[in-house]
Image: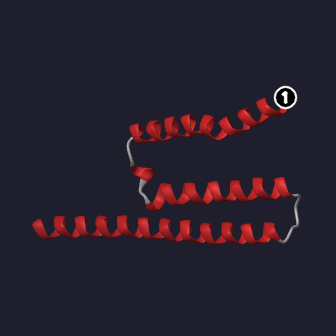
Amino acid sequence: MSESHDHKDAHAGHADVDHHVRAAYYVFGSLLLLTGFTVGAYFLHLPHKLAITLALLIATVKGSLVAAWFMHLVSERTLIYWVLGLTALLFLPLLLLPTVTVLDRVMLH
């Protein structure tokens, strides 16, 4: 009876590994596809601001995939997501602060 139980555990472990390997292949393929989109976007000769926006959007998706799967954030607890969300929320004002100071100088002149 012990041997059949061990066999079931080994089979379940093997299926779990297969699932993770398959997911890693999908993520890797997605990263390759998104890299192709980035290169393709360059050849579209879009206006400068639109090209930067598109490149940042693609980079954000790629970074999210890497963080979620290869850094194992997909399986982390909810607290990790709250901390990451709070960090992103507090980081946005830091990015916008130079814009506000430049606009203040422009309005004074």
Q: Which residue is mark 1?
A: 107
Q: On screen, 46 above or below 101?
A: below
Residue 27 location (% of width, % of height): 55, 65
Residue that lies at the very extreme toward the left in this rendered image = 2
Q: Residues within 10 Å of mark 1 (few under 14, many from 20)?
A: few
Q: Quadrant of the N terminus?
A: bottom left
Q: On screen, 66 above or below 95?
A: below
Q: Is residue 58 left or right of residue 50?
A: left
Please name the amino acid that badge 1 sits on.
Met
Residue 51 location (% of width, % of height): 81, 59
Choose between 39 and 26: the one closer to the eye: 39
Tell me the residue at 52%/60% (across/down): 66
The secondary structure type at the circle numbered 1 is: helix
Q: Is residue 61 left or right of residue 46?
A: left
Q: On screen, 83 above or below 9?
A: above
Q: Is residue 81 left or right of residue 11?
A: right
Residue 88 location (% of width, % of height): 55, 40
Q: Quadrant of the C terminus?
A: top right
Quarter occupied by residue 105: top right
Decide if residue 109 is in sight here. Answer: yes
Tell me the residue at 39%/47% (across/down): 76
Decide if residue 1 is in sight here. Answer: no
Choose between 63 and 93: the one closer to the eye: 93
Residue 48 location (% of width, % of height): 85, 58
Tell me the residue at 56%/39% (across/down): 91
Residue that lies at the very extreme toward the front in this rendered image = 109
